[in-house]
Amino acid sequence: MTSSDSTGFDVAKIRKDFPILDQTQAGRRLVFLDSAASSQRPQQVLDAMDNAYLTSYANVHRGVYQLAERATNLYEGARKRVAGFIGASSPDEVVFTKNATEALNLVVGSWGRANLKPGDAVVLSMLEHHANIVPWQMLAAERELEIRWIPVHDDGRLDLSELDRLLDGAKALSVTAMSNVTGTLTQLDQLVSAAHAAGAIVVVDACQSVPHMSTNVTAMGADFVVFSGHKMLGPTGIGVLWGRAEHLAAMPPFLGGGGMILNVTTEGFTPDVAPAKFEAGTPPIVEAIGLGAAIDYLESIGMDAIRQHEVELTAYALRKLTADLGSSIRIFGPAEPHERGGVLSIELENVHAHDVSQILDEHAVCIRPGHHCAKPLMRHFGVAATARASFYLYNDRDDVDALAESLVAARDFFAI
Amino acid sequence: MTSSDSTGFDVAKIRKDFPILDQTQAGRRLVFLDSAASSQRPQQVLDAMDNAYLTSYANVHRGVYQLAERATNLYEGARKRVAGFIGASSPDEVVFTKNATEALNLVVGSWGRANLKPGDAVVLSMLEHHANIVPWQMLAAERELEIRWIPVHDDGRLDLSELDRLLDGAKALSVTAMSNVTGTLTQLDQLVSAAHAAGAIVVVDACQSVPHMSTNVTAMGADFVVFSGHKMLGPTGIGVLWGRAEHLAAMPPFLGGGGMILNVTTEGFTPDVAPAKFEAGTPPIVEAIGLGAAIDYLESIGMDAIRQHEVELTAYALRKLTADLGSSIRIFGPAEPHERGGVLSIELENVHAHDVSQILDEHAVCIRPGHHCAKPLMRHFGVAATARASFYLYNDRDDVDALAESLVAARDFFAI
Amino acid sequence: MSGLEDLYREIILDHYRSPRNKGELPAPPARRTEGFNPLCGDEIVVFVNVDDNDTVTDIKIGGQGCSISQASASMMSAAVKGKTLTEVEELTNSFKTMMSIHETDIGGDDSVTSVESSATRDLPLGDLEALRGVVKFPVRIKCATLGWNTLTQAIDEQRNDTAQ
Amino acid sequence: MSGLEDLYREIILDHYRSPRNKGELPAPPARRTEGFNPLCGDEIVVFVNVDDNDTVTDIKIGGQGCSISQASASMMSAAVKGKTLTEVEELTNSFKTMMSIHETDIGGDDSVTSVESSATRDLPLGDLEALRGVVKFPVRIKCATLGWNTLTQAIDEQRNDTAQ
Ligand SMILES: Cc1ncc(COP(=O)(O)O)c(C=O)c1O
Ligand SMILES: Cc1ncc(COP(=O)(O)O)c(C=O)c1O
């Protein structure tokens, strides 16, 4: 067992908190390598949610009785935890959504509709997930916006040589912090300062980075940052939009309903201030509480330790897969582990990603085949799909070894 | 103990499934009378969710491995359960949202934006919740729509004497099935046929009815029906939009992102068919599974039995409160229990609802003061707030007695 | 009901039952400002006359609300009449400090929100001290501050208008 | 890997490695229709020539996909060439019946979706029978039917055009 790596990061101990990983499939230990799609969650998170449902549940914000007050405190406490975790200057800058996708749609639908007019340009990168493409395309079709694309190098890094030209006159840059296909960590410093210099706001899709490394939105300097709970040990049904207070204050509401108003008459309504303004209806109360518990868990391990563990594991995986599979494998993304997250998209010669995943499943190795909601990037790489393995704090070298072994089996099965 | 009422409905047995109700507050048994805001949930629902997280969790739809397949089957199985529960003709007519509010915003934002032009009229009722008002007002402001209001009688029933005139030339009628303030069951048969005769589509806010009585959307004849999971023993973070297949097929997407596309290029995207078209991003997977378990639980008790239990309890409460509080109490809504749900909004003479609720909390009786997200109705009744008690399958006559007793105490406290 | 006695002090109930300065002022010349407590539906309307020396010459309170919001607004109206805008602001700060010390505890985590500190926090509050019991009922703090926030808004608007 | 042998029958791997009718046809006169499997990224392009007697005179398959989608499309192309549109539809129904018997089991609840019943379900499928193993892998059913759905769409479009 190599479950405790050179830094003393104790995967065996962590795994005990994740009962789902302690299962076998046809006699083999389950190897879960699909955290980039959605992570698993520790017992502590489930306990926090069950505990809320079993002791302190009621609808929030409008109740006077103690049960409702406790529920409200747990919900708002989660907002403070999120704010602290990402270095927001106030919990009021944290809006809970159902997922990162809704958060991006909120930015486009509210900020975008209020600020973009026909002919305006928005800059995206070729690395983007559909969640950061389609909402802009929807508004572009409605408003006749121009969408410009930052190109990508063959190794998955963004090509910023034409950045200033692309940003010239643009109103917004919306870009991923880390690709969910190649693991590329984008050059946020340069992107943010160039965009701001050009007068464009910056939206950062931090779905893949927030779960895996420490984040400070204030230092990052962006205008909006989004991420999802389910990729960071939290439950499904919760996402986060962080926005600068002055933007949130100026933006019109996105969804209308209860909880986001100061007043409603038959003639019209007066919106409340942020974050309430953007949280129409009963929010994902217990999901927020679960996310708060996930953050407590992540902080107890330490984001820097998690990042370092994943860098080492990624370095090991790059070596191991290259050694075992040689020229029959193509690994997408930067070669240098420090320039990427623990996401390995691969192409196996003569074996389609779907078939790779099918055969790996027979080895109880869970990876994801497909376009990973990044079809423009797939088309750029000239592939319909990749097979993607992704790591998190509960993965170790044994998992990488199982991956390598099963990939060899897949190659050999189709080579017969 | 009167926990088993005349119909043999066994509240004591049901309560055993709701551990949260088995608590005391300052030595008194907790009396939870706020299910109209959000219900509690049985252990079975929590177990179903924990079980999914602990044994069968992965992101849905895009995985080949068995864990992902099991998760997808559980998620799509929940959709089938919902479809069966509400009498939909196909699971494809069931769209999962984060709450009923999002579902209403989806109808307005997608169907409304595609079908309404300046000058068009939409008809609402004075009973509506803000969730069924504000989204229409937002579109009305953007599109210069006319909003017409069906008035309400003093006893909380809708005044339909001018219905045909109100519907004349209207494009949509959006109306509640049951008021969350007065409990009024609206005359859906008449409303639906009059609206359709006038060429208007019908949207039904069934948030308060679906949890408490059997529902058949096909028989109802509406075009869209929305409700929330958290009011029907399900978790937070999940709502439902049911829509006629032909509407869903014709409507543009609402939120853009992963999971709702057939193809994306740098030039634009091709949406998938419903329901995927309307479920952008990682859906509330485990919340849907929890809602499925809630439906199993409700069906094991029987919706007709639940409805009958609540009618009897409401009848008892109307008698009891009138007897104990006489002229110092005003109870809103229809006098006839069969014409209403188990929602009692009251005004106590000389005691503001907020203070009522504060004093009731001292008796461990949980009710909700406020405008209940229905300010136009409040203004019509000439009150800023009411104190609202609402019943569900786990309430019994003891709870009503505790309510009456604590209301007497509140009246007396302020009468000193 | 021991806890309740802290909340519903006799002087509060007195202001609730017999609110001071209830009513309206002709606006203009008075400034009319509405405040809402979105949580419970309370609505307050503050009418205020400020003379050329920045002194509150008259104030009236309208609207509907619970005992705490009504009593707090009533006490406020009595306390600010005749004061200059600067004095009103100092009083408001003192009152809010009394309330907000506990506001930061909501959520059981005060690492993010910081306690508003102000040189004026020790200003004597007189009758208003009776509202100190509200801090034990955090949900009601919003009730107690509704009138004050509305008055602050009125003063801000007044200042902006004068500045223009 | 016993389960896998049911899925990856030799004849399937053969069609995957040496797909029949791979390529393009000039369109027009051929009809060109694209199909997507949104789950995995597979894209199929069907080029089909239909003569005045409603007979498929030529068919070519383009695009990228997994072994199952490619093999199924390859077998399909071989099976439909020379058939009338009505015959193609019957064959499609038979094939889908073989697949969809299991599709209704997804979710472990067949009370809502009903099995599509068709008089033609017993049509002999020949080589296509090899794909029967796919039903044990429900996720892959969509792969197996991608080419067929795309062809159906092409035929529907063709009929609509002719009708106009
Ligand atoms: C009648 C009615 N409509 C809509 C809603 C909004 O539901 P949700 O807050 O779950 O979106 C509610 C509940 O608050 C309601 O009672
Ligand atoms: C980079 C990136 N952006 C956006 C998303 C969308 O997140 P969600 O599906 O939780 O809305 C994902 C995950 O699927 C992602 O990896």
Image (cartoon, coloured by chain):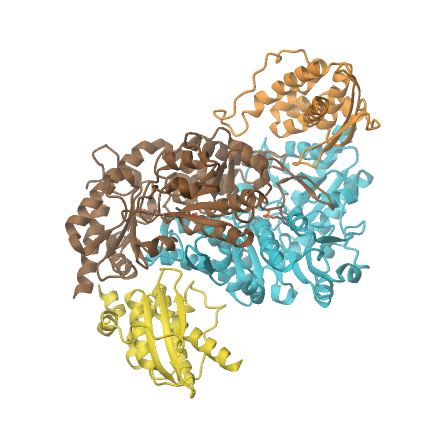
Chain colours: A brown, B cyan, C orange, D yellow
Instruction: In the displayed orientation, state which residue is furthest to the right.
Output: C26
Q: Give the percent coordinates (x, y) of residue A344.
A: 28, 48
Q: Residue furthest bottom?
A: D53
Q: Is residue A359 left or right of residue D106?
A: left
Task: From this view, report whether residue C161 is shown above or below residue A297.
Answer: above
Residue visible at 60% across and 27% down in the picture: C138
Q: Nearer the viewer, residue A103 or A42?
A: A103
Instruction: Give the x, y percent position of residue B219.
Output: 64, 67
The answer to whether any part of residue A228 appears in the image is: no
Q: Quadrant of the C terminus of chain B?
A: top right
Residue A304 falls left or right of residue B293:
left
* Image quadrant where one finds the N terminus of chain B: top right
B322 and A332: which is toward the camera: A332
Question: Residue B241: x and y, percent?
Answer: 57, 57
Q: Could you tell me residue A151's position as x and y percent? A: 35, 47
Front residue (pair B121, D164): D164
Q: Is residue B335 visible?
A: yes
Q: So how many labels did they put on this image?
A: 0
Q: Is residue C115 left or right of residue B281?
A: right
